[in-house]
Amino acid sequence: MTKILLFSTEPVGATMSGPGIRSFHLAQELAREFRVTLMAPGAAGVGLRGVESLEQPRAGRDLARVAQAFDVVIARRLPLGAMRRLARSATRVVYDLYVPVLSEQLAMLDAELGHPSSVRFHEAAMLELRYALATGDAFVCASERQRDFWLGMLGSLGRLDLETYRRDPSFRSLIDVVPFGLPSEEPRAGAPALRGVIPGIGERDRILLWGGGIWNWLDPLTVIRAVAVLTERRRDVRLVFLGSEHPEVPTMTMASQAFELARSLGLVGRAVFFRGGWVPYDERGSYLLEADVGVSAHFDSLETRYAFRTRLLDYLWAGLPTITTRGDDLGDLVASRGLGRALDAGDVEGWAGAIEAMLDDEAERARIRERIDDVREVFTWSHVARPLMRLVEREGARVSPGAEALALAIEHLVLRGRTAFEIRGPVGLVASRASRLRLRR
Amino acid sequence: MNRVAVYAHAPLAASMKSPSIRTHQIARALEDHFEVAVLTSLSELGGFDAVVAQKLPYALARRLRRGGTRVVYDLYTPNWLEALAILEAAPTDDLLLRLARVEAYSQELALASGDAFVCTSERQRDYWLGVLAKLGRLDIDAFGRDPTFRDLIDVVHFGLPVERPVAGERVLKGVVPGIDDGDFILLWAGGILNWTDPLTVIRAVLEVARSRPAVKLVFLGVDPADPDLPVAAREAVELSSSLGVLGRTVFFHSWVPYEQRSGFLLESDVGVAAYLDLVETRLAYRARLLDYFWAGLPTVTTGGDTLGELVSERQLGRAVGFRDVAGWTDAIRELIDDEEARRRAKENLEAIRSELAWPRVVEPLVRLLRAPTLPISRPRPARLHSAVDRFERLRLSFAMRGPLGAARAQLARLGGRVAAR
């Protein structure tokens, strides 16, 4: 039986964010046919039947040694050292490119700019990405649109070669689409989570739920402004930001901007609520079921074009009508399948109107719930994971790292040296080298 | 800014293929906004405010930029993906493969060095953004100026001529032996290339013809006597003749000049084109379908590419699955039998005609030509690729002409460059 190592960069367990959730479900699906080992930070048994757990080694070298005992490694990203060793080994590596790293980082760094090391950080991440693309045996991503982008990058790295084309002219055996899935069980209501729990949210209030972090590329400001418009007409609208603190991601500038705006409009604690902390994965059903409408908004940027916002899937899961900005994959799904409303970026009046319509039109809410039921079938984990199962089964031709990979590795080394130099200065750099050498002995 | 040069590989001619048609139509549409010169000689491109080209020699593009000319590339098609489809059918030929690689490198150099780009669909734009990302063109500075990157690359669809097709003399009905006045003609225009799937259509048409003998399938741009026919075309001819339907239900007509297409389109009832499931399919833009739209022909085609999806979304005919003979049979039957459906499709085609008129589709290009030129931080990969490109070209030249010929060609190039200065 094929032995698979699923490498998760983020914790898998009670408090999971997108990548952790994805690893959790993919492990579950893969375990139906393969021997699966999950390696996640602090993973001491994730409670998945048939899935073994392994502690994550600190050094890339050790990681590669452990990974080589498996037939296939599935990872979002790996340390460069591990990538290099695996590229030369018999172990096949499938990279999960569902996070559009480049566009997300551009959006994040644009707001956090001013720190030279952030630019270097971005350059290094890009090099690692190119290395993965140059050496990976197969890839999955979250949407057809992302796939087109990755095909461009793969083509430019010489990965769309004639031999592969002759075997498979669609290149689906090189890169295929594994979107996000919904859990197969229905969301369950637990203890009250919002109404009567958070002061200011009463039994009869109508709740708009922002079900995830506030990242720099998202636009909570338009939604807050729309709520401000509505509070002049009615008193029952409550906008709740759920989990503005991601377990692994530092708070971004936009989160504080959102809070500042809501405060200056006098809405905090009255119509706009920020629930700090990250909601445990098992408990999010309660929050979703108490909400009336799911909301998500973003700016028109490159990030938007390739984004796959999993919070929108949470709304689908709970049967919530969704109001969102158009332009990303799931936003377009909302528009084309009539699952709520998709609006232009920054359209405050449009938002206010859409919120009122979604809250007050009971017939439309019922129709949307029916349409959501049709769409849900497509997004079950067992359905979406199928292409990954195919890629794992396939005994592909081994990719041997070419000159491109070597050049990238050298470039990466130089970049790391330069970054360390910039951060620590010459003396610090020498000192840290020396201490590393000592440690190694 | 007002003087724009559009570089065309070939002069405006009667028998043009879609890339050249595109160039000349873009040039015409730009005349409403700029003083436009259509040039076919590289040496005349200096001194303009901007140059639009599908490709340029890298060295020339750099010289033009240094001289203050803005270089905007029209990325008509990803060269490498097209090359794969062509090379796949041919026996492995090192020389051809290298030639294709050089073409791909040239396109990449254009992407590394151009000021701005247009391509034919949003999907192609995604592909090109991937290449641009790899080349380091999507950097933080650029994102800060324009987070959508629409100032770097935007979409200019393949457009439709403003003027309507005009009927001239009869070209099919009563002219081609075997095609009569009352026949229902399915037209496949634009030749049979290796990524197309004529066999599925032939099989479906034969199925339909059993109950509706008036149905005729006409392939335009295929000369059965041509020894260099693409493999797919050869197969189509062979299948038709082996089934004994050649000249009775299935017809092959040789290439017709651009200006004469309208006669064929206007005498037909439905436009057809089928494609295979290739990487190229998803990213392709099928210019022949636009001819059908132009002539108001309800269209049956394979779903999956940009225009196939437009056909099903806007109800311009029917979109069918890959190699789905039964689906094709149903679609053709429906369009023959349901006059009302044909009429509705024609109405919807009217709306598309104005949306895709050339003056409208070039608007993003007009914006890109007017934008201020910013310096490009020339990324390292570009330098590397430039060197590789030169080396590959030299090797290729050597293989094709031998050492003496290669040296002579190099000399001639240098001579030309000196003369151009």
Image: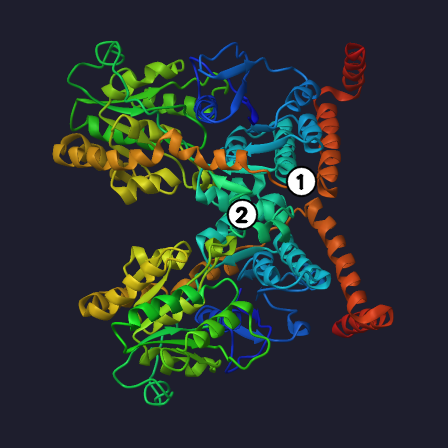
Residue at screen point 65% across, 22% down: A69
Residue indicated by mark 2? A171
In this picture, residue B253 sits left or right of residue B373: left
Q: Nearer the viewer, residue B197 or A438?
A: B197
Residue at screen point 63% across, 46% down: A159
Q: Which of the two discs, 2 and 1, labels the residue nearer the N terminus?
A: 2
Disc 2 residue crowd, few under 14, some 14–19, many 20+, Cα 10 Å: many
Labels 2, 1: one chain: yes
Quadrant of the snapshot with the C terminus of chain B: bottom right
User: Which residue in the rendered view is the most extreme toward the right?
Assistant: B404
Horizontal and vertical percent for residue B281? 47, 56
Horizontal and vertical percent for residue B244? 41, 78
Q: Chain of mark 1?
A: A
Q: Amino acid at mark 2?
A: Phe
Could you say which quadrant of the image residue A284 lies in? top left
- Residues at discs 2 and 1 in contact (Cβ within 8 Å): no
Could you say which quadrant of the image residue B140 lies in? top right
Judge whether A270 appears above or below A96 on screen: above
Could you say which quadrant of the image residue A198 lies in? top left
Where disc 2 sits, the SS reads: loop
Q: Tell me how far mark 2 sits from mark 1, CA to CA.
A: 15 Å
Q: How is the image coloured?
A: rainbow
Q: Nearer the viewer, residue B315 or B387?
A: B315
Residue at screen point 45% across, 58% down: B364
In this picture, residue B236 sits left or right of residue B418: left
Residue indicated by mark 1? A399
Q: Chain of mark 2?
A: A
* Marker disc for residue B334: none
Residue at screen point 25% across, 83% down: B182
In this picture, residue A254 sits left or right of residue B417: left
Horizontal and vertical percent for residue A110? 53, 34
Q: Amino acid at mark 1?
A: Val
